[in-house]
Amino acid sequence: MVQGIKKEDKDQIQYPRMDCVDEWVRHYRSYATEGRCASYIPALGKADPSQLGICIVGPKGSVIKSGDWQVPFTLQSISKVISFIAACISRGIPYVLDRVDVEPTGDAFNSIIRLEMHKPGKPFNPMINAGAITIASLLPGESSRAKLEFVYELIEKMIGKRPRINEEVFQSEWKTAHRNRALAYYLKETGFLESEVEEALEVYLKLCSIEVNTEDIALIGMILASDGYHPIQKEQVFPKNVARLTKALMLTCGMYNASGKFAAFVGVPAKSGVSGGILTLVPPGIKRELPFQDGCGIGIYGPAIDEYGNSLTGVMLLKHIAKEWDLSIF
Ligand code: DON
């Protein structure tokens, strides 16, 4: 049961079929050998590639958890969703979109090529590194600490606990962030980066190093599905227009250069990270079979990733669930 749910709500919860989810997780776990854990950040290479876990949270507090749902992992690029929301809340959507566009690239997440090819070098979207580093520089506050604090408070409102940084992953990233440094210096030179390079990088990489489990990201997905409203805490955490914009960006750009395939074969907004996490959600009110008629957030963890940087078994599991439960928004 999700933290904070009241006794009277508990009585109304319909528990969906869980046994089939366990079976699907067991089945897709066996495909993990076809992928491998990210190793360009040395600390991520230590994960167990055979793990696969899922947590699904509905707005009335009903939960399905299966497999390695409890294993901690770092947000990595899933943090791009949260920092974008934080920047929109603090600066307003027009200010943010003046500095970062909303167009998919079809390139790898850390690609540098389009920054110089398309003048004036405005990052294509906030879900790739160039966009997310720019977003980190726009966060409110005059120091990395203040900028991070703003995002930590937002996360705390959503998941009910203060986020924790995995120091080993952060140090590992910080020492190997050569391409991110190159992107940040380029963005500084073109005037898109509002803070100093090292400050934006520290914020960006610390947000990537926040430790979560599948339940935490499922809760964030559930709030996005509910247009920014936390149905359990009964609080509007961020405005509806920010939620809608974020979901559109997740659908078009959230799975890197496999976003088109994911939209075609799963059909819901999602954001992945190289540690093997996927934050996804199903909006309420669409014709669908089972089990969450009111929409839901889904958190996935499967550290064996594919050639695009997305969890290999996680995407397989999501494709299966989307088909079984008719989840596509289209
Ligand atoms: O910028 C990086 O290299 C990471 N900290 C984030 C990467 C990430 O998750 C992108 N991939 N799927």
Image (tube, rainbow, N blue to C red):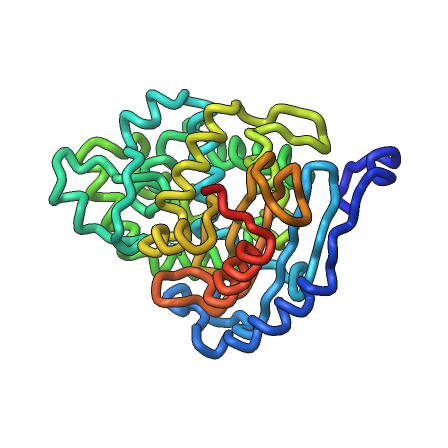
Q: Is residue 32 left or right of residue 291?
A: left
Image location (x, y in percent) of residue 7: 88, 36
Q: Is residue 96 above or below residue 113?
A: above
Image location (x, y in percent) of residue 75: 51, 51
Residue 202's quadrant in the figure?
Answer: top left
Image location (x, y in percent) of residue 130: 29, 44
Viewer-proximal residue among 44 and 111: 111
Q: Is residue 118 left or right of residue 246?
A: left
Image location (x, y in percent) of residue 269: 47, 44
Viewer-proximal residue among 151 and 170: 151
The residue at the point 49 percent across, 59 percent down is 169
For residue 153, say whether it is visible: no
The residue at the point 18 percent across, 43 percent down is 115
Q: Is residue 179 left or right of residue 31?
A: left
Residue 258's quadrant in the figure?
Answer: bottom left
Of the four image quadrants, the one with ligand 1 is: bottom left
Viewer-proximal residue among 36 and 200: 36
The residue at the point 17 percent across, 37 percent down is 121
The residue at the point 76 percent across, 42 percent down is 3
For residue 56, say whether it is visible: yes
Q: Quadrant of the C terminus?
A: top left
